[in-house]
Amino acid sequence: MSDKSDKNALDAPLPEPAKKTAGKRRTKASIQSVKGESSSVKTDSADEATVHSVAIKEINALLGKIKAGRLESRADVSRARGAEREMLDGINEMLDAVINPLNVAAKYVDEISKGAIPPKITDQYNGDFNTIKNTLNQCIDVVNGLVAEAGMLAKAAVDGKLATRGDAAKFGGDFGKIVKGVNETLDAVIGP
């Protein structure tokens, strides 16, 4: 029954003999009704607390794994339901959205560090991930340019073009210093 119909039922006039005990009966019935509602609320609250407990335990376990560097870890949604399951699914999707681009970046940096220059990243990323992609692509361009410049110098030397020098101005920072150092080495070897 709705609250309005419950109120109307309680306000209805009682026959005279029932008035003497009605208060007690109503109170007892109301208490029983409230007890029944209360116990079902407790059951609902216990179920909800259990579900929240599952979600909280899952989040805490996941947080520990992520802090330990186990970035492949995801929340186990199998015991959660409803909004808590959606929340855990959302956390997993968020981790995928962050970690997948980081894994691509880590793979590229690893390859570059081993001298295996990968092709430029062509996948589409947004925001900060696009900045990371663009920076890695610039790194690939610079390393490829440095390799090409060194190859050009080596070929010129083999061809007897000993006056050929690399263009240090094409490269910034330490990469420019490398080309300049090679040029100075050639000057020192060829000059005397």
Image (cartoon, rainbow, N blue to C red):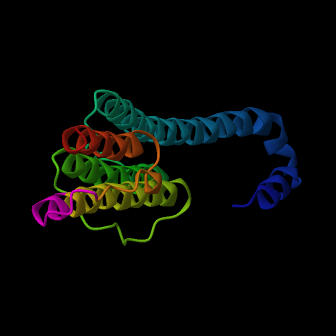
Taking the magenta stretch, the answer to whether it contains residue 51 is: no
The residue furthest front is 192
User: In the picture, which quadrant includes the C terminus?
Assistant: top left
Image: magenta residue range: 154-163
Q: Nearer the viewer, residue 62 or 34?
A: 62
Can residue 78 be seen in this snapshot? no
Residue 7: horizontal and vertical position, in percent? 83, 53
**Quadrant of the image occupied by residue 67:** top left
Residue 33: horizontal and vertical position, in percent? 62, 42
Taking the magenta stretch, the answer to whether it contains residue 157 is: yes
Total numbered labels: 0
User: In the picture, which quadrant includes the N terminus?
Assistant: bottom right
Q: Which of 61 and 178 is in front in this view?
A: 178
Can residue 134 be seen in this snapshot? yes
The residue furthest left is 158
Where 56 falls versus 155 (above or below)?
Answer: above
Q: Which residue is drawn at 79% across and 44% down?
A: 18
**Quadrant of the image occupied by residue 4:** bottom right
Q: Nearer the viewer, residue 25 or 93?
A: 93
Q: Which residue is drawn at 10% across and 62% down?
A: 158
Task: Decide if residue 36 is on the left or right side of residue 72.
Answer: right
Task: Decide if residue 149 is on the left or right side of residue 87.
Answer: left
Where 88 falls versus 52 (above or below)?
Answer: below
Where 123 falls versus 84 (above or below)?
Answer: below
Q: Nearer the viewer, residue 124 or 185?
A: 185
Residue 178: horizontal and vertical position, in percent? 32, 42
